[in-house]
Image (cartoon, rainbow, N blue to C red):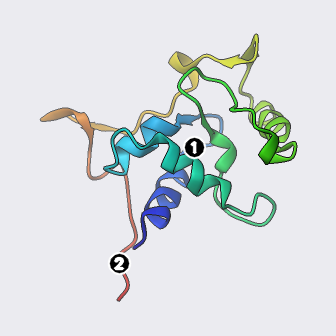
Amino acid sequence: MTVYTHIYDLVRQIPHGQVATYGQIAELAGLPGRARLVGYALYQVDMVTSDIPWHRVVNALGKVSLSPLRRGSDYWQRSLLEQEGIAFEQDRINLGHYRWRPNRSPASPNQPDASAVHFPPASD
């Protein structure tokens, strides 16, 4: 499994009406401090045909990251999130309310419970 595939598998688990941050996905993928790598992976997604809910990943401030390289998809991202019932206040999402929180293991509260984050078996 490639790193990008691992990231995509995590992003697919973000429920409708919730968001995660780039850094949060990096942490869950075992890539602490690699939030930009998550951004690079999501930039490669075909935003029209893919089943990856790329629009549910936002920056650590709860904002849609704006970039001229995204050719307007940053505005589309906001629209998709609003269609899912996510409210923006001054261009920010309240992460305290909308952040995805995978189940945490009681023995290790800072790590996701193995039952909360699922990955398909590796293919050889």
Q: Residues within 10 Å of mark 2 (few under 14, many from 20)?
A: few
Q: Amino acid at mark 2?
A: Ala
Figure check: 53 above or below 87:
below
User: Element type at marker 1?
Assistant: loop
Q: Nearer the viewer, residue 33 or 55?
A: 33
Q: Is residue 45 above or below residue 28?
A: below
Dot 2: element: loop
Residue 7: where, in percent of width, then height?
47, 56
- Pinpoint residue 104: horizontal percent, then vertical percent: 28, 36
User: Residue 94: which quarter of the image?
Assistant: top right
Mark 2 and mark 1: span between their CA atoms? 23 Å
Q: Position of residue 109 (x, y in %)?
A: 21, 30
Label 1: few (<14), some or many (≥20) within 10 Å?
A: some
Circles 2 and 1 in contact, beta carbons < 8 Å? no
Quadrant into which the N terminus falls: bottom left
Residue positioned 43% across, 37% down in the render: 24
Question: Which residue is most to the top?
Answer: 90
The answer to whether residue 6 is left or right of residue 56 is left
Mark 2 vs mark 1, foreground winner is 2
| Residue type of the residue flagged with mark 1 | Pro
Q: Is residue 123 left or right of residue 73?
A: left
Q: Tag on residue 15? A: 1
**With respect to residue 115, does 111 lie above or below?**
above
Quarter of the image for the C terminus: give it. Answer: bottom left
Sequence-wise first label, 2 or 1: 1
Q: Is residue 93 left or right of residue 106?
A: right
Question: As rendered, which of 75 and 66 lies closer to the eye?
Answer: 66
Q: Which residue is pictured at 75% across the width and 17% down the height?
A: 91
Q: Which residue bears the numbered disc 2?
A: 122
